Amino acid sequence: MSELTQTAVKTTAPRVLRKINTRTLMIEGRALLALVLIVVVFSLLSPNFLSPDNLIVMTRHVAMNAILAIGMLLVILNGGIDLSVGSIVGLSGVIAGMLLEGFEIPGLDLFLYPAAWVVIVVSLGVGTLAGWVNGVVVARLNVAPFITTLGMLYVARGIALLITNGTPFSRLGGEEKLGNTGFLTFLKSAPLGLPMPVWAMIGFAVVFAVVLSKSPFGRWLYATGGNERAAELSGVPIKKVKTRIYVLSGLCAAAVGLLLTGDLSSATPSAGEFFELNAIAAVVIGGAALSGGRGTIRGTLIGAFVIGFLVDGLVLVGVSQFWQQIIKGAVIIVAVALDQLQQTLQKRRSGKAALSPPQPSEQVPAPV
């Protein structure tokens, strides 16, 4: 490499990095500004909005949507969508409830009461299995993610209804003589004053932030979302990446199912309805591109706090539930519209820059 080329690389690379950082800052800055505005407005409308107790309650609500949104972010980074996460939330909770109340082994007249840790592992496994099925159908059979996950939405919800016959499981405390206690005690605990869902959100966020930024899988995911064909030609295992992201999305949904079951002290088949919409909203508001290739854990968390604080604030000041839906929908539309407007302006500027003649200082002198 010549000295002239090395100098050009050294001067161009920082400029490109500055552009990327500026763009990311602008995208996530909008969500952060919206969050600050929400906090200011509702703290003025209600003196209880920023009270410690209310902040803990709101953060606990945000945590469940944030975990679900982290799994959704992985799918959207790949250019896909997962509509089944809400149903997987309900199914995982129902599996936990069924195991805690005990189940009969057909033909043996025997009831089993698994320990709490077994219940948690099995419930997480069920959600992960549902995600794996989604991933295999999308990656191996080339079925559109929208259709695949829409089908799983109905399948998972139907299985939950069959298991419960439409009635919730409410005896989740267990009994000492059966050895299945500790489920609710663990999920309702609050180490250092923070509820378990908040700690789970922190754990998921840290782990997946490291995965996306430091691991080969994270680089593969951004590459496939940006240009799948180019990534495939570069040796990226496209099918493995697609399968894994749906597996991880199912795992996140199952974790939320357990946390929600512990929060409600009941496992109901209707749990998690429309949760997928809130997760998608958090990812979009956080600056991720629905076309794939762009998005961060940090932005997704900010988006989840925007949705959570907005909804809880509207409830606190007594706004009708119907208006809540309208306002939340309007916020999502504005967030996407601003992102599309910014992309359009950038394309126009790039087009003008490509058509404009080079400046005198950039012109190469003719050979003598």
Image: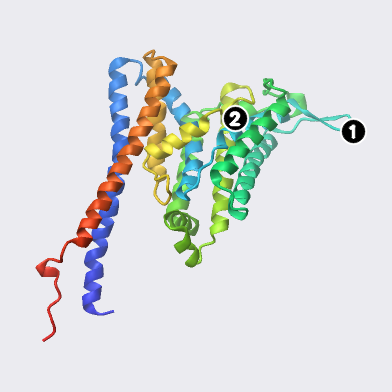
Near-viewer residue (70 or 288): 288
Q: CA distance from mark 1 to mark 2?
A: 34 Å
Q: State the image quarter where residue 269 is shown.
A: top right
Instruction: Return the mark for residue 186.
Output: 2
Q: Which residue is at a point 45% across and 49% down the rendered structure image?
A: 77
The correct choice, above or below, for 125 with respect to 39 in the image is below
Q: Residue 107 has which mark? A: 1
Q: Is residue 42 visible?
A: yes
Q: Percent x, y for residue 41?
A: 28, 21
Asked which secondary structure carries label 2, the reply is helix
The residue sitting at 47% across, 38% down in the picture is 69
Q: Is residue 9 left or right of residue 225?
A: left
Residue type at numbered disc 1: Gly
Can you give x and y, in whole percent of width and height, for residue 331 in the image?
35, 30
Task: Estimate how packed mark 1 is, as few (under 14), some (14 to 19) or many (20 or more) residues with alpha carbons within 10 Å.
Answer: few
Picture quadrant where residue 281 is located: top left
Amino acid type at image mark 2: Phe
Secondary structure of the residue carrying tag 1 is loop
Q: Is residue 80 left or right of residue 308?
A: right
Image quarter in which the C terminus is found: bottom left
